[in-house]
Image (tube, helix red, strand yellow):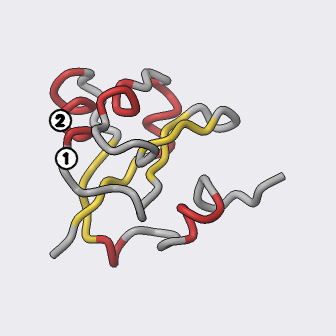
Amino acid sequence: MYKIAQVDAEKCGATNCRLCILYCPEPNALLYDEKRKCAFVAIDRCKGCGACVRICTDIAKRSCIKMMPVADVQGGFEMAKYGFPGKSQE
């Protein structure tokens, strides 16, 4: 089963550390939403390596990211097309 990263926007927004974005090996898979002040995943680019989870959990001690089956990700592939889930482009 293919898994990808999913960011807990509430937890991530409270920390504003951006380490996951710096260490993600796939360009433009993890992006930062300036309005919400948190990271989000472009699920069509995420390769499921888990580097972001290790950085967030083990290095930053924040636990804002978890890996989950691609079929269970809220918002589906809409995230990659429109940016942050649940928000329309303004």
Mark drawn on residue 50: 1
Up the image or down, 17 lies above or below 51; here it is above
Residue at (43%, 37%) from the top-left corner?
Answer: 11
Image side of residue 85 versus residue 89, left or right: left
Crowding at mark 1 (Cα within 10 Å: few <14, some 14-19, many 20+): some
Residue on which the image places disc 2: 54
What whole-number distance in Å separates the C-alpha atoms at marks 1 and 2? 6 Å
Q: Residue furthest front?
A: 27
Asked if marks 1 and 2 touch (Cβ < 8 Å), the reply is yes
Q: Secondary structure at mark 2?
A: helix
**Nearer to the camera, 21 or 67:** 21
- What's the amino acid at mark 1? Gly
Q: Residues within 10 Å of mark 2 (few under 14, many from 20)?
A: some
* Disc on res. 41: none
Which structural element holds mark 1? loop
Q: Position of residue 37 (x, y in %)?
A: 59, 31
Where residue 30 appears, x then y in whole percent? 43, 43
Above or below, comparing residue 81 to residue 15 in the picture? below
In this image, 73 relative to 83: left or right?
Answer: left
Q: From the image, which quarter does the N terminus lie in?
A: bottom left
Q: In this orientation, which residue lies closer to the viewer: 10 or 69?
A: 69
Occupied quadrant, residue 68: bottom left
Q: Quadrant of residue 51?
A: top left
Residue at position x 20%, y 21% from top? Answer: 59
Drawn side of residue 76 relative to residue 65, left or right: right
- At 84% from the left edge and 52% from the top edge, which residue is drawn? 90
Q: x, y percentage for residue 33?
A: 61, 39
Amino acid type, label 2? Arg
Residue at figure coordinates x 40%, y 42% from the top left = 27
